[in-house]
């Protein structure tokens, strides 16, 4: 069934327009979706601002500790921090204990230096074995080539 251009235009003209009620529902749902998206963007923006503020606050605290305070004041503030944050206190204790174990876990015997090691070439014959193997392979190859020349030239 083929339609000509005129028939197609007639069919397209008969297309019904959406009702006003349908359009109102469509625009209402679109407005709801836009409101949800705006709300999500606002929440994400607020979270980003909060994180940026926390980073700048932490940098300011570190800068104040390093630049403006005396060592006694730094010690007092550090003690206050550990008193208020038991998790940080436990983590610091674990780190310091690990460092102490690593430092004191050295072998008790004398340290061996490079000069205490035996002469490597004196006991290692792998270079000589490699050279002799290479020479044997080369001689075997040359014998095969010579044999092939004799065989193809009629010498055998």
Image (spheres, rainbow, N blue to C red):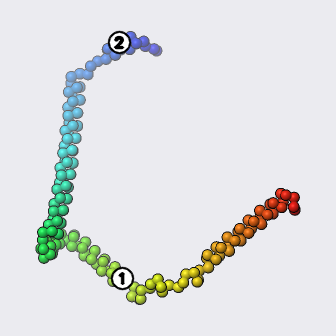
Q: Residue at x 50, y 84 (%)?
A: 117
Q: Quadrant of residue 27?
A: top left
Q: What is the secondary structure assignment of the residue under circle 2?
A: helix
The quarter of the picture where the C terminus appears is bottom right
Identify the residue under disc 2.
10
Between 109 and 89, the one nearer to me in the picture: 109
Q: Is residue 67 left or right of residue 127?
A: left
Q: Are marks 2 and 1 in contact (CB under 8 Å)?
A: no
Q: Residues within 10 Å of mark 2 (few under 14, many from 20)?
A: few
Q: Position of residue 91 (x, y in %)?
A: 25, 72
- Secondary structure beneath label 1: loop
Res 83 visible: no
User: Which numbered disc, 2 or 1, marks the residue that appears first in the sequence?
Assistant: 2
Counting other residues with Cα less than 10 Å from the Cα at mark 1, is it few (<14), some (14-19), or many (20 or more)? few
Q: Quadrant of residue 105?
A: bottom left
x%, y% of residue 46? 17, 49
* Residue 105, label in figure: 1
Residue pictured at 17% horizontal, 56% vertical: 53
Q: Nearer the viewer, residue 105 or 112?
A: 112
Query: Which of the two residues, 134 or 14, is positioned nearer the viewer here?
Result: 134
Residue at the extreme bottom of the image, as rendered: 109
Q: Residue at x 17, y 54 (%)?
A: 50
Disc 2 from disc 1: Cα separation: 93 Å
Q: Residue 13 in the image: x percent, y percent?
A: 32, 14
Which of labels 2 and 1 is toward the front?
1
Along the line of sight, the residue nearer the viewer: 20 or 6: 6
């Amino acid at each position: 069934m083929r339609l000509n251009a005129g028939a197609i235009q007639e069919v397209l003209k008969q297309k019904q327009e959406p009702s006003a009620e349908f359009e109102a529902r469509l625009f209402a749902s679109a407005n709801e979706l836009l409101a949800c998206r705006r709300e999500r963007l606002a929440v994400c923006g607020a979270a980003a601002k909060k994180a940026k503020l926390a980073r700048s606050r932490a940098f300011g605290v570190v800068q104040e500790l390093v630049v403006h305070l005396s060592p006694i004041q730094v010690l007092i503030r550090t003690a206050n921090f550990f008193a208020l944050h038991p998790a940080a206190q436990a983590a610091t204790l674990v780190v310091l204990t690990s460092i102490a174990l690593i430092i004191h876990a050295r072998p008790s015997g004398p340290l061996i230096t490079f000069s205490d090691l035996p002469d490597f070439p004196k006991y290692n014959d792998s270079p000589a074995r490699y050279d002799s193997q290479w020479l044997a392979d080369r001689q075997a190859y040359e014998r095969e080539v010579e044999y092939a020349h004799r065989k193809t030239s009629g010498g055998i």
